[in-house]
Image: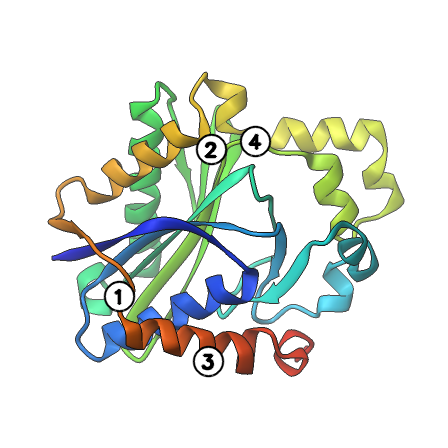
Amino acid sequence: MWRLLPFRRERASMNMAIDEAVSESVSSGGAPTIRFYGWEPSAVSIGRFQRIEDEVDLKECAIHGVEVVRRRTGGGAVYHDRDGEITYSVIAPEEVMGKDIPASYREVCGWVIDALSDLGMTADFAPINDVTVAGRKVSGCAQTRRGGVFLQHGTVLHSINVRKMFSLLKVSDEKLSDKAIAAAEDRVTSVSALSGAGYGDLLSSLRRSFCRGRECREGSLSPDETARAVELAGCRYDDAGWTFSR
């Protein structure tokens, strides 16, 4: 039985802390969990092994009220727009998802592909961890495995502002040119650019797809998970020692 958590927007530190708190719960025998969430305010998340000063324009983030958080998963820096994307997390015992990392990426990305198909889009899996439509990226993800627990979280773009994204991430002046922006927009797409599906339509389709063929039950965080997430947000994800650890 999978637990499906309701959609919530949270601060960046709480989003990462909830993933870790739920992972601890699953490690102790708790139900495998699917959650969809947003970011309030918008945020940039960086991969576990990235050097923040190399990836993020901290001054520009501060000007725009964009938070910055370090993930436990690898991968690159990601801009999470409050209204432009839906983020998902899949947290389960490792044996449920299997130890083959490429295969597990393909499986969960397949759930995203099915959700987009339900909305009239033909999407493909682009190894190792992207979903594309007509060769343009619409979703990316990262995963980690710790203590026998599988965690994959990823984003699905409903809309995208490439110019704003590039202003927050450290890119060359050349990449901020109109020509470079247009080229980047040619490599990335979004649900709003591909269909008339609204944000709520995308969320509903993702929820249906992720539970298809699995026994899911609506649930909520337990009091212990909530307390642990608050603790982790304060002692890890809001802590400069963690954020600037590389």
From this view, report whether residue 126 is shown above or below residue 182: below
Check disc 1 and report the residue beneath it. 99
Q: Earlier in the sequence, mark 2 or mark 4?
A: 2
> Distance of mark 3 from mark 4, alpha carbons?
33 Å
Query: Looking at the image, which residue is at 29% across and 32% down?
Result: 114
Of 191 and 223, nearer the camera is: 223
> In the orientation shown, which residue stands out farthest toward the right?
173
Q: Earlier in the sequence, mark 1 or mark 3?
A: 1
User: Based on the displayed image, in which of its 4 quarters is residue 200 positioned?
Assistant: top left
> Distance of mark 2 from mark 1, alpha carbons?
24 Å
Q: Earlier in the sequence, mark 3 or mark 2?
A: 2
Q: Amino acid at mark 4?
A: Ser
Note whether residue 78 is visible. no
Q: Earlier in the sequence, mark 2 or mark 1?
A: 1
**Residue 72 picture location, percent across and down:** 49, 70
Q: Amino acid at mark 3?
A: Glu
Query: Looking at the image, which residue is at 64% across and 74% down?
Result: 243
Of 51 and 233, nearer the camera is: 233
Check disc 3 and report the residue beneath it. 231
Check disc 4 and report the residue beneath it. 159
Number of residues whose C-alpha sits closer than 10 Å to that of mark 3, classed few (under 14), some (14–19) or many (20 or more): some
> Distance of mark 1 from mark 4, alpha carbons?
33 Å
Check disc 2 and report the residue beneath it. 132
